[in-house]
Amino acid sequence: MLLTDKKVLLVGGKGGVGKTTVSSALAVLASERGKKVLLVSTDPAHSLADAFGREPFGDRITRLAPNLDGLELDPDREVEQHLAKVTAQLKRFTRPEMFSEIERQMRLTRQSPGAQEAAMLERIAHTIELGLTDYDLLIFDTAPTGHTLRLLSLPEAMAAWTQGLLNANQRSAKLGEVLGHLTPKGGRDITNPLADPAEHATAGMDERNKAITETLLSRQRLLQRTRELLLDKQRSALLFVLTPEKLPILETGRAVKTLLDEKLPLAGLVVNRILPAHADGEFLAQRRLQEQQHLAQIEQQFSQLRRYKVPLQATDIQGIDALSRMATLLAAAGL
């Protein structure tokens, strides 16, 4: 089964190793194989538009080539939209005198660790759900390694966190029932003296709790579906890009261990920018000797993973024609 026959591909790696070029060329390759593809960037330093030689297109689906669309997700914008949505939902379920406190808490949340990843994860989950109805394949050009690993570990953590909120909401609902029964039968409506004000209060609380529960359950189901998809080797795969250099090898080693521990479907490594055999000159000869040592280390350290080798190109890879040539190299490497 070719990687382009999957439903979701995530391309990761250390900054500067060619993730965007590889993911863009892979998207071109899939589209040339007849797949309808959505290429999505989650890297704060977007360069999809640059790779295709286009003007920045941002957070709107844009046609990049036949059968190939692109989308650049802005992490900062995702945080703002996510918090605005949460704020609106909280205000629906609280008294007006609590609004200023809600807004204060949201300002603090905006700066909290993980806020960007949490907001981005929810957007990615929605993008996957909607994207798979219109596309054969979604390819994600992810942020550098550490960010990607935190993102991939979030569905499980956030599902547990959401379950904690659900449990807390259920306890709150039960407490509300008890308080409703203990409420003095005072303050009756003069137009309806037989009505019990405690019943009205309890009914309002039940409605709020039901709305909160449904919101949390909907989110929990979405995150669970996302995690199940990412763990499914038949539908999803992760591809890591590295170059035959010391630091990328070290960082990739740590990432691979984490991904294998998490049982995420790591399909292999793209070893990018290998000096071609015909490159000549004394400088390149010395460089090749060092590179051979790094390639030998990659072969030994990552022997359990498939390795796709791609040669260094003489010029920058930009524009659809250059990406198509790169796609041919990826196909020749076995992708």
Image (spheres, grey):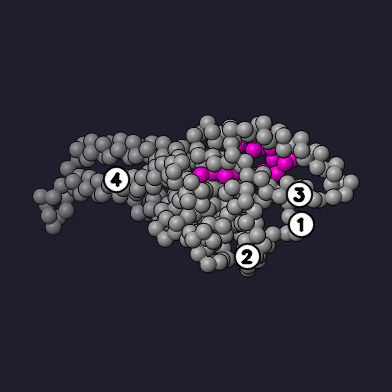
User: Furthest residue to the left?
Assistant: 194
Residue 306: percent from left, percent from top: 59, 39
Q: Earlier in the sequence, mark 2 or mark 3?
A: 3
Q: Amino acid at mark 2?
A: Ile
Which mark, by number, is residue 276? 3
* Residue that appears at 47% across and 55% down: 137
User: Furthest residue to the right?
Assistant: 282
The residue carrying mark 1 is 314
Toward the viewer: 270 or 196? 270
User: What's the distance in space between the residues labelled 1 and 3, CA to CA?
Assistant: 10 Å
Is 245 colored magenta in this rendering?
yes
Label 1 vs label 4, nearer the camera: 1
**Label 4 with label 3: CB-CB less than 8 Å:** no
Which mark, by number, is residue 320? 2
Q: Amino acid at mark 3?
A: Pro
Q: Earlier in the sequence, mark 4 or mark 3?
A: 4
The residue carrying mark 4 is 209
Does the rendering let one see residue 288? yes
Residue 53: percent from left, percent from top: 65, 66
